[in-house]
Image (spheres, rainbow, N blue to C red):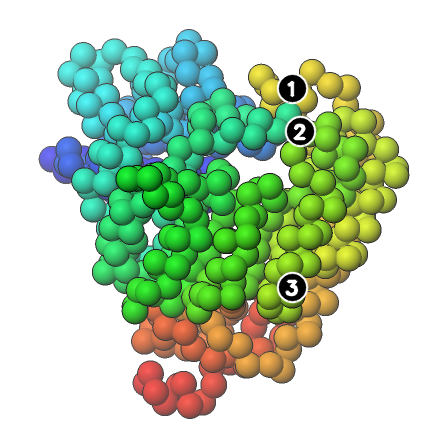
Amino acid sequence: MVKKIFIKTFGCQMNEYDSNRIFDTVKEIGFEKTDKYEDANCYLLNTCHIRDKAKEKVYHEIGRVKKIFRSKEKPIIIVAGCVAQAENQEMLKREPYIDIVIGPQSYHKINEVILKHSNDKKKEEETEFDTISKFNYLSKIKNKDSKVSSFLTIQEGCDKFCHFCVVPYTRGPEYSRPFQQIINEAKELVEAGAKEIILLGQNVNAYSYNVQNTEFRLSDLLLELDSFDQLERVRYTTSHPKDMTEDLLNVYKQSTKLMPLVHLPVQSGSNKILKLMNRKHTIEEYLKVYENLKSINPKIEFSSDFIIGYPDENEEDFKKTMELIEKVKFTNSYSFIFSPRPGTVAAELKLVDPKKSKGRLEIIQKKLFKNQIKKNKSLEGKVLNVLVENKMKDGIKLFGRTEYMTSVIFDGNIDCIGKIVQVEITSSNQNSLFGKLQESIKKKVA
């Protein structure tokens, strides 16, 4: 009998990469992936601990699974990811329906843990930080992700210890994968059809791998990928302003494949709040990176993350954030009200009045959304290069992205998938562009 695994992924892009690699691993013990959760012999939740109520979402999902399998044979229930790392034994005690809890640095042990549970039916918990063994193991299993745009983790963990962030506790200290290991996996992805590779890390631009007295940094990886003939685009995320080093900025002068969108979380426009957050950068330093990149290429745009209502944020601090948004005119950005994460320094601080925080968030989002709508509107009537990723669920239209990661939806045939095509933008909304394929392209791919 064929064993089937259903994997549900929450949260960040790194979790998406991890879920893909988990599946590559469990294939070794006979599992096939299923998109029908009711057919699963193994139900895996890959969790995220960044946003509010992440833990409760897991228990809610487990409750839903219980109902689905009430009259069927129970699958093996696995909780993986950062909630698993943070809560581990507590989860097994609170919810007996869970069979296995496994942290993000222990995925190389997942086959062993599944087989052990299948034999003795005992609860299993594996949450040791063993990042080196994990990536050494995964490097021996081919990455068969066949998506046009593929993720590739190059670095995990963080040593910055921002006061609001759980990453150092759930992903551990910074670890950079061996340079050649990353390049080999990138080659696998390109062979499988990837036209775009997005390099991932909790602090991706802190990547640093030393071998034989030679240091390899993110800039070296980007320039190496630039030489891949079949690769069209390269991106990286998420960065820290403190690690936007000169060698990395210079790649924007040299690379032909590095996209002109820089996702660089600032979190606040106030130096006072940045200090309270332990962000280790100032607004002046942030703006210097912005200005340096703009001088290299005026077409470079910035996206960012903002935490609103951080403890002790006042109207003046909020005003400074608004001023920064006005100056930089961020695109595709994210903003959230501060929510305390257990175990962090900020979890013990007095919260800003929730009504004030909500009001400020609405103002910030209105400004950010207005910038995005204005930007998208300005592209109407223009012809853009779009990397086509897949067909929409309606089976008719195609989906792709611009150089700035903006979604583009247009009519076309499947021959366009995996290619960069020219699309004339006819209309837009806040999140997407809509257009038509250029006639010359239609004839070429027909």
In the image, taking residue 62 as reference, residue 260 lies left or right, namely: right
Quickly name the residue at label 1: 345
- Circle 1/circle 2 CB separation < 8 Å: yes
Q: Residues within 10 Å of mark 2 (few under 14, many from 20)?
A: some
In the image, taking residue 272 as reference, residue 46 lies left or right, namely: left
Q: Is residue 217 visible?
A: yes
Q: Amino acid at mark 3?
A: Lys
Indicate whether 121 appears above or below 339. above
Quickly name the residue at label 3: 294
Element under label 2? loop
Q: Is residue 65 visible?
A: no
Tag of residue 278: 2
Q: Residue at x 40, y 85 (%)?
A: 441
Total numbered circles? 3
Residue 355, by quadrant, is top right
Viewport quadrant of the C terminus: bottom left
Labels 1, 2: front one? 2
C-alpha distance separating marks 1 and 2? 10 Å
Q: Amino acid at mark 2?
A: Asn
